[in-house]
Image: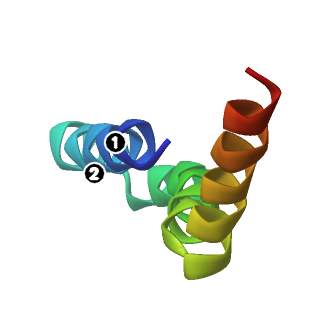
């Protein structure tokens, strides 16, 4: 998720540079929100907890 969101931000910035239309930066808003949420510690703990539960079931 973090890699995909980072690539999305790079893509939007490249499009702004290519077209010269700064209004396209509004397209980066949901991508930036996803990037920030994916990079937070609670998300990491949630993913680690899911793996632990799945490991116990196996």
- Along the line of sight, which residue is nearer the eye, 26 or 40? 40
Residue at 48% across / 68% down in the picture? 39
Q: Which mark is residue 11?
A: none
Extreme-top residue of the structure? 58
CA neighbours of label 2 inside 10 A, class few (<14), some (14 to 19), many (20+): some
Q: Is residue 25 left or right of residue 13?
A: right
Q: Position of residue 48 (x, y in %)?
A: 60, 56
Residue at 73% across / 20% down in the picture? 58
- Nearer the camera: disc 2 or disc 1: 1
Q: Mark 2 or mark 1, which has the lower sequence index?
A: 1
The residue that mark 1 highlights is 3
Label 1 secondary element: helix
Q: Position of residue 40 (x, y in %)?
A: 55, 76
Q: Is residue 28 left or right of residue 51?
A: left
Residue at 30% across / 37% down in the picture? 11
Proximity of marks 2 and 1: CB atoms separated by less than 8 Å: no
CA neighbours of label 1 inside 10 A, class few (<14), some (14 to 19), many (20+): few
Extreme-bottom residue of the structure? 41
Above or below 37: residue 24: above
- Along the line of sight, which residue is nearer the eye, 23 or 44? 44
Residue at 51% across / 54% down in the picture? 28
The residue that mark 2 highlights is 13
Q: Is residue 55 left or right of residue 35?
A: right
Mark 2 to mark 1 CA distance (whole Å): 15 Å
Label 2 secondary element: helix
Q: Is residue 14 left or right of residue 12?
A: left
What colour-coding does the image apply?
A: rainbow
Q: Position of residue 15 (x, y in %)?
A: 29, 38
Above or below 27: residue 29: below
- Along the line of sight, which residue is nearer the eye, 19 or 28? 28
- The number of discs equals 2
């Amino acid at each position: 998720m973090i890699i995909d969101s980072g690539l999305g931000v790079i893509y939007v910035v490249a499009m702004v540079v290519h077209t010269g239309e700064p209004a396209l930066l509004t397209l980066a808003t949901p991508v930036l929100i996803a990037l920030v949420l994916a990079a937070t510690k609670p998300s990491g703990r949630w993913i680690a907890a899911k793996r632990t539960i799945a490991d116990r079931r196996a």
